[in-house]
Image (cartoon, rainbow, N blue to C red):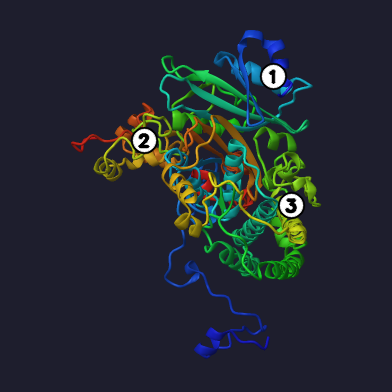
Amino acid sequence: MNPSADALRRQFGPAIRRVTESCGDTIVTIAPGRIREILAWLKDTPDQVYNYLVDVTAVEYRDAELPLEVVYELFSLDRKVGLRVKAALPKDAPLEVDSVVPLWAGADWLEREVYDMFGITFRGHPDLRRILMWETYAEGHPLRKDFPLRGRFSRSEQVRQALNANPEAHYSLEELGIAEGYHDLPPDMRARLARGERGRIPDATGGR
Amino acid sequence: MAVKRTLDVALGTTGLDERGLPVTVPLGFETPGATAVEEAPRLGGEHMLLNIGPQHPATHGVLRLVVELDGEVVVRVIPHVGYLHSGFEKLGEYRHYNQIVPLTDRMDYLAPMANNVCLALAVEKLMGIEITERCKVLRVIACEISRIISHLVWLGTTGIDIGAITPFLWMFQEREKFYNLQEAWTGARLTTSLTRIGGLMADIPDGFEADLRAHCRSLLTVMAEVDRMLTRNGIWAGRTQGIGVLTAEEAINMSMSGAMLRASGVAYDVRKDRPYLDYETYDFEVPIGEHGDVYDRYLVRFEEVLQSVRLLEQALDRLPDGPINVADHRVILPPKHAAMTDMESMIHHFKQVMEGVPAPVGEAYCSIESPKGELGYYFVSDGTAKPVRWRVRPPAFINLSALAKMSQGHLLSDLIAINASVDIVMGEVDR
């Protein structure tokens, strides 16, 4: 058992919900509201120094009653010790936790991936967009258990959407703002982009 | 000037003026009748949007970069990934543990055997299986061959990105020898599927050890040639030194791993710091850089190839006899002849094929030092034969996230060099 678990208990008391061990790894489950505070403490306290964020991911269990878990895999490069920190998010409340990007810049893409695959929102993330799926992806969050293996839409619907894909969606407003050519775009397209409607899938009647 | 240009010979002219210098071809507006070119508009302050990829040879796969340029200077890079997303993690939740092995081949397809090994180690940690000594050493050989293959491809393609064709040809010639070994062992050059939970798909074939030793020796000769050609080459150094710098603090903060982290001076190597497969008993060094630029990443990977050769030689020296698989036939398929003749073996065979091998309730994270960096597999089990969650910690994906920061303020051509230095493989980035 990793001694950091006891140190966390002493420091944070009831915010440490559970300490378990599995296959030799210590797992500390904490209150989701205090993730950033507790991880910052683990990162900066002199005898903890978990300064390396190995991974951020999430787990959903097959048992629909069980909450989703956000998992942080930490490692101390100085002490060569690892620690896994989890936070359970009940499904009946909004799936939201604080982003740890202010602590580790490396969490940026990892949190985007969790958002993309599980639909968990990270408060305070600088640029929370889908990363592996495209931005107009409308079928939901693929790694959720209620997401069927072959996707939500039928094959023909997927093909139809691909063929009708809005070419404007290949560039975000931010990206189009770079080019001088932005001012040459048709006014209605600029207006749509300015309203943040980029990449909306055109409806079946062909109207945009 | 004795040599005449071919075209001039064909046209019957000398191609030289009265001073003996080549005649210059007059530009358009100097020719009679042509109008002078309009003065170019002043472009200062206007930024240009440039799209690179997803189909572009310098992006090493289907990476797409949207670049904001001020003249030739990169102001901002917005990477877009996911074009090769195959949903491997989702697929894994519908498969037995052994059936996941082929999926891992297709992630880091430049080092498939290392991925196979990582999967097997993670599942064995989850199930509490202790593998045999011979299997451990063979897996070390598999990992180090993968590292060599991957680094050779990296060195060759990075050379091409920067404009050097020769290393590419030399490297691919050497890689071919290791690929032949890999093919002799596993039957495939790319989709090796080498490991099984509790062992290996096959033992090494006859003559493998002698060939591997011979290839290691010839590799050292070629690496010495590349060293002579690149390491102190003014063009190479000029294109790579001081480019894409990450300090040690930044590299740790951005969760870099592998050569990206070590080139910045952080000696973190999973083989040393979280040893697996008895790596702590081998004698090898972890090279680190001091500047954290593209050149140091080149030096680090170069040295890692040499260290891998050392590891391979030690592994071959200590390779023990004995079985490659654990004796437990609840985990490893019994031999075919036993399954056909012996009732108990047939039951084991049937149950493994039809039901898979159940893992106890729990979770395990196991990481290895793959050629790209720290490759980690995280399994969560609910007691059935299929994982609840299979998470891949993809080193190339996380290393690529630093691209935007590293390339700010560099030239567009340096962006290509920086992107090459990350050593991405899109199969793993997108999964």
- Give the label on residue A137, or none: 2
Q: Residues within 10 Å of mark 1 (few under 14, many from 20)?
A: many
Q: Are marks 2 and 3 in contact (CB under 8 Å)?
A: no
Question: Could you say which quadrant of the image residue B147 lies in?
Answer: bottom right
Residue at screen point 62% across, 8% down = A14
Nearest to viewer (mark 2 / mark 1): 1
List x then y, in percent, for residue B239. Answer: 68, 56
Residue B333 in the figure: left or right of residue B255: left
Question: Could you say which quadrant of the image residue A188 lies in?
Answer: top left
> Which of the two discs, 2 and 1, labels the residue nearer the N terminus?
1
Q: The residue under label 3 is which amino acid type?
A: Val
Q: Chain of mark 1?
A: A
Q: Chain of mark 2?
A: A
Q: In this view of the protein, can residue B201 be seen by the observer?
A: yes
Name the residue nearer the viewer: B184 or B238.
B184
List x then y, in percent, for residue B263. Answer: 73, 46
Name the residue nearer the viewer: B107 or B358.
B358
